[in-house]
Image (spheres, rainbow, N blue to C red):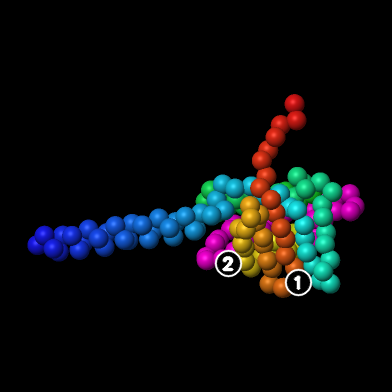
Amino acid sequence: MEHSLKYLTSILIFISFGSISLSAQENALQTTSWQLVTIYGFNDSEFIPRNPENYLLRFRLENRLQIEADCNQAGATWLLEGDSLELTGMVTTRKLCVQPSLFNRYIMNLERAESYELQNNQLIIRTNNADDWMVFQPYTFTPSF
């Protein structure tokens, strides 16, 4: 009986720790905010926003994503599974932003997001096209008063 109890306790501890690490993986982006650094595209092109603070991703609770896209706002639902990132149900305003705006390229890449990496304090989002990917850095709001 005592041997069975020790075995059962070991299994429960293993399951608990396994679910904690799975939960941590699932929540790797939850409650984080990121600002766009660069969009990479075809022929090694680089697109760097003039005002990176206008291109934000805010991963909220309950898998809600708040998106700042230059002069527009957007929202979506996000899901992580391993290194895959799926953004669904994206809705966006469609104001005409002052050029040179990266709005269209940014939103298009987010709609085609396929995977993510957290590396060297950066978020890298890759699309379903190997030539298109984006790099973000952590964003912290600093009031200007």
Mark 2 residue type: Ser
Q: Describe residue 61's horizontal placement relative to residue 113 as left or right.
A: left
- SS for callout 2: strand
118 or 34, which is in the foreground?
Answer: 118
Residue 37 place in picture, x, y as percent: 75, 53
Q: What element carries label 1?
A: loop
- Chain part drawn in magenta: 76-105
Residue 4 location, x and y as percent?
15, 64
- Reading the image, the residue beneath label 2 is 84
Type of residue at label 1?
Asp
Q: Which of marks 1 and 2 is nearer the N terminus?
A: 2
Q: Which mark is residue 86?
A: none
Q: List the single residue furthest toward the right.
A: 99
What residue is rendered at 16% in x and 60% in y?
Answer: 5
In-front residue for pair 50/72: 50
The residue singled out by tag 1 in the image is: 131
Would residue 98 appear left or right of 131 to someone viewing this image?
A: right
Most distant residue in the front direction: 120
Decide: few, some or many residues near mark 2? Use Cα within 10 Å; few <14, some 14-19, many ≥20.
some
Residue 97 lies in the magenta stretch: yes
